[in-house]
Amino acid sequence: MQQRTLGRTNIQVSSICLGGNVFGWTIDEATSFEVLDAFVAGGGNFIDSADVYAAWAQKVGISETILGKWMKARGNRHNIILATKCGSELAPDKKGLSKAYIMQAVEASLQRLQTDYIDLYQSHVDDPTVTMEETMEAFNTLVQQGKVRALGCSNFSGARLYQALEVSAKHGWARYETIQPRYNLVDRDIEADQLPICRAANVSVIPYYALAAGFLTGKYRKGQPLPSTARAANVNTRYMNDKGFAVIEQLDAAAKATGATMGQVAVAWLLARPGITAPIASATSVAQVNELVGAAALKLDIALG
């Protein structure tokens, strides 16, 4: 699997990032281990998690916990580029991007992950109640302490990303080297907002929802019953409309022309976009992992979108 660099760092990551939101939620620990093993066997090394996974199922930190157990069992921490996030609400007194909370949250993540450093530590959501100086100073301290190798943000607007970069440059602090936005063939707002800033400042883009929560795999069809999955209701609300189904028609045609699956075409499209480093996609089975790995090798010569 091809490798790429995160921002201005020397951190080399696989061109597909495995999303850890499903670990301990839609798949149990044993299946999570199988998925992780298959990803590494296919050449992957970049795995993304968050402390809030899976709070919605009353399992705060379960994804990080499973990742920590897996790395310890396999003895492969030094081979894994580990990304996680903080800032989303875990409890009324556990949220945000204040210096005090960031310092608390990173220690909890390190303990669950059974490691003494995080390769990419990201602010999960913006926190306008705290000054950007306070947030970036806290993150810079973590880099200086060696607990974090690189910084990133998720769900930031272009304006707030630019402000963060300016603050870091002014003080000579470590900056956000990555941004993690929602981006796929249907969700394309970042093309007019964050992407121009990222390209100009050499900030890597690691988009989540690469497969639009499974919609772009083709398993959701107009007039057909919804799959019995935890994500089906969200997919129905966000993507099952005229815009979404028009994209599905294009994917259908491209998949037939290339001999690839619709999901592989959707991920390959992202990989071919300027500035995209590693699309994030989750997998709940070894078969799905193998499909993702195949997407990294697919070269598209068909225009989409």
Image: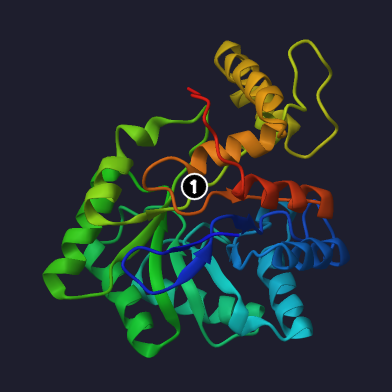
Is residue 210 at least partly visible in the picture? no
In front here: 103 or 255?
255
- The picture places residue 143, in percent across and down from the top left corner, at 36, 81
Q: Amino acid at mark 1?
A: Pro
Is 225 located above or below residue 153 in the figure? above
Color scheme of the displayed model: rainbow
In front here: 121 or 191?
191
Residue name at image x 65 percent, y 84 percent: 114
In front here: 256 or 211?
256
Residue name at image x 59 percent, y 25 percent: 238
Q: Which residue is mark 1?
A: 207
The kind of secondary structure element at disc 1 is loop
Q: Quadrant of residue 273?
A: top left
Is 305 located above or below residue 242 in the figure? below
- The picture places residue 201, in percent across and down from the top left corner, at 23, 55
Residue name at image x 76 percent, y 52 percent: 290
- The picture places residue 191, in percent across and down from the top left corner, at 35, 34
Is 59 located above or below residue 251 in the figure? below
Is residue 211 at least partly visible in the picture? yes
